[in-house]
């Protein structure tokens, strides 16, 4: 069984998680509240088992390292390095997992439809949809470029520092520009940017699960804020 | 294509270049956890590396609004990835002003493009905003989360309400320098290939 959530619920989730991520947790209770919010259970519901498992291990390790081995007195290069990375993982990972979940499980059509229902201007909707769709493409292209570089036997920058950036960024830009042209040709032939109002095949409707999740996330936000700032 | 309004094609271009710029920013950002001084040196790194996609983007701008929309998107992405909402007004303001400057040069003039990119780069400073505005609570937060005192001290020595002015100026200067480098690279690769 897979749970189909309304994109608006997902956007709300992103909003709440980002807000909470910015306020750091100080007590174990707050940590617990924060960990509950990570939508790993949602990933499992949507059958992204591998990703759920990966995130779980990754986050768990970072948490363990942060609490067990590192304190405010840690010094030296290696520990500063570790502290930095673990800190950042522990701090921002919930937001990243949520964003990953939303990007992976929302179809672009659904997303655009939801944005339209919330009366967001078309320009922002379309651009944002392209951004969402484009991250996996960039990753793919980048892998291809790295393979090509390996074939030619060029490691890092082939000797000069500027080359490190140039050899990677320029081919990436070339392919992205080409993909962009194809994408806009495809989109325009399908009527994007036409004068008529866009209709959608999918009917978006808030279901019980959506309201339940929204309620849960609101509750989490309230609990977090109250126990951090008021008590 | 001499209509004033933005077309679907323009929106797609904006989306692509925003994604590229964010990837550049993210890659540089990951280096920042090695040492806090690197966090401060974002003002040098990101304008210069980011100038390559941005200068290519500038060659595609013909109408008002493309830079502004890009800055709104950046603000949204910064929020979603947990960088905070404090910087959002600054990001959008930088975008709109950069857009106006570029417009006054007709989006083609060399000088206006360079200045406009310099202003646009000020969005990077928005990421420092939580550090400056709420210095005390931010510092406490960092220590609570598990950053070392050493890291925090260095961070606040590098970034505080006094140095932010310097950082802003540096950001602008290196934005202009980056624009020159970016222009040269775009000329070297893309104009030869006939893409621009």
Image (tube, coloured by chain):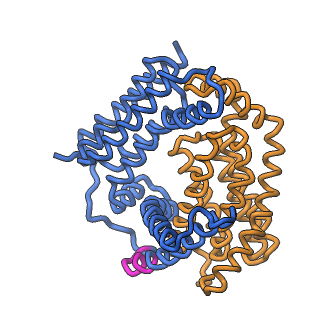
Main SS of the magenta part reads helix
Residue A215 or residue B157, whichever sits in front:
B157
Q: Position of residue A69 (x, y in %)?
A: 51, 23
Chain letter, blue: A
The question of residue A187 being in magenta is answered with: yes
Magenta range is A184-192
Residue at the far top in the pictured view: A231
B61 up-or-down from B155: above or below? below
Mark count = 0
For the colour orange, the matching chain is B
The answer to whether one can see residue A130 in this image is no
Name the quadrant containing residue A23. Answer: top right
Q: Can residue A124 be seen in the rendering of this structure?
A: yes
Establish if B64 lies above or below A56. below
**Where is A71 relative to B125, above or below?**
above
Q: Give the left or right position of residue B174, taking residue B4 as reference.
A: right
Q: Is residue A48 left or right of residue B95?
A: left
Q: How far across and down, in percent of the image, does residue B193 sit?
A: 61, 85
Residue at 73% from the left image edge and 28% from the top image edge: B153
Q: Quadrant of residue A165?
A: bottom right
**Measured from the top left, where is residue A203 in percent x and y?**
26, 57
Residue displayed at 62% across by 64% down? A157
Q: Residue furthest front?
A: A153
- Picture residue at 56% right of the left edge, 61% below the top: B18
Please identify the quadrant where the N terminus of chain B is shown.
bottom right
Q: Residue at x 78, y 71 (%)?
A: B104
Q: Is residue A77 magenta?
A: no
Question: Where does the image place residue B131, in percent across and percent down from the top left?
Answer: 69, 34
Residue A62 placement, left or right of B37: left
């Amino acid at each position: 069984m897979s749970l189909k959530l309304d994109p608006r619920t997902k956007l709300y989730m992103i909003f709440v998680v980002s807000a909470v991520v910015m306020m750091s947790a100080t007590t174990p209770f707050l940590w617990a509240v924060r960990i509950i919010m990570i939508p790993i259970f949602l990933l499992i519901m949507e059958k992204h088992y591998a990703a759920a498992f990966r995130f779980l291990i990754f986050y768990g390790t970072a948490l363990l390292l942060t609490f067990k081995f590192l304190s405010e007195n840690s010094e030296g290069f290696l520990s500063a390095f570790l502290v930095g990375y673990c800190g950042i993982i522990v701090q921002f990972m919930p937001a990243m997992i949520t964003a990953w979940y939303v990007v992976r499980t929302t179809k672009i059509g659904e997303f655009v439809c939801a944005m339209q229902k919330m009366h967001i201007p078309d320009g922002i909707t379309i651009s944002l949809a392209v951004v969402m769709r484009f991250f996996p493409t960039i990753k793919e292209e980048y892998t291809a470029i790295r393979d090509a570089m390996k074939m030619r036997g060029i490691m890092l920058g082939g000797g000069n520092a500027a080359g490190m950036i140039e050899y990677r960024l320029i081919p990436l830009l070339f392919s992205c520009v080409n993909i962009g042209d194809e994408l806009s040709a495809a989109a325009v032939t399908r009527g994007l940017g036409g004068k008529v109002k866009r209709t959608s095949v999918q009917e978006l409707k808030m279901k019980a699960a959506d309201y339940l999740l929204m309620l849960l996330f609101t509750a989490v936000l309230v609990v977090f804020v109250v126990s951090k700032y008021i008590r | 294509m001499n209509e004033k309004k933005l077309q679907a094609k323009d929106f797609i271009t904006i989306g692509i270049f925003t994604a590229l710029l964010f990837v550049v920013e993210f890659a540089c950002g990951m280096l920042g956890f090695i040492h806090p001084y690197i966090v401060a040196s974002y003002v040098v790194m990101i304008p210069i590396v980011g100038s390559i996609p941005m200068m290519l983007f500038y060659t595609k701008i013909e109408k008002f609004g493309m830079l502004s929309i890009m800055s709104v998107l950046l603000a949204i992405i910064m929020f979603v990835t947990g960088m905070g909402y404090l910087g959002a007004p600054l990001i959008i303001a930088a975008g709109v002003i950069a857009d106006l400057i570029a417009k006054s040069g007709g989006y083609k003039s060399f000088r206006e493009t360079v200045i406009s990119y310099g202003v646009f780069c000020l969005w990077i400073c928005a990421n420092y905003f939580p550090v400056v505005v709420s210095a005390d609570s931010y510092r406490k937060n960092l220590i609570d989360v598990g950053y070392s005192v050493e890291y925090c001290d260095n961070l606040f020595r590098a970034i505080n309400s006094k140095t932010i002015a310097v950082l802003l100026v540096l950001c602008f200067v290196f934005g202009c320098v980056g624009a020159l480098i970016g222009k040269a690279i775009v000329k070297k690769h893309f104009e030869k290939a006939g893409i621009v």
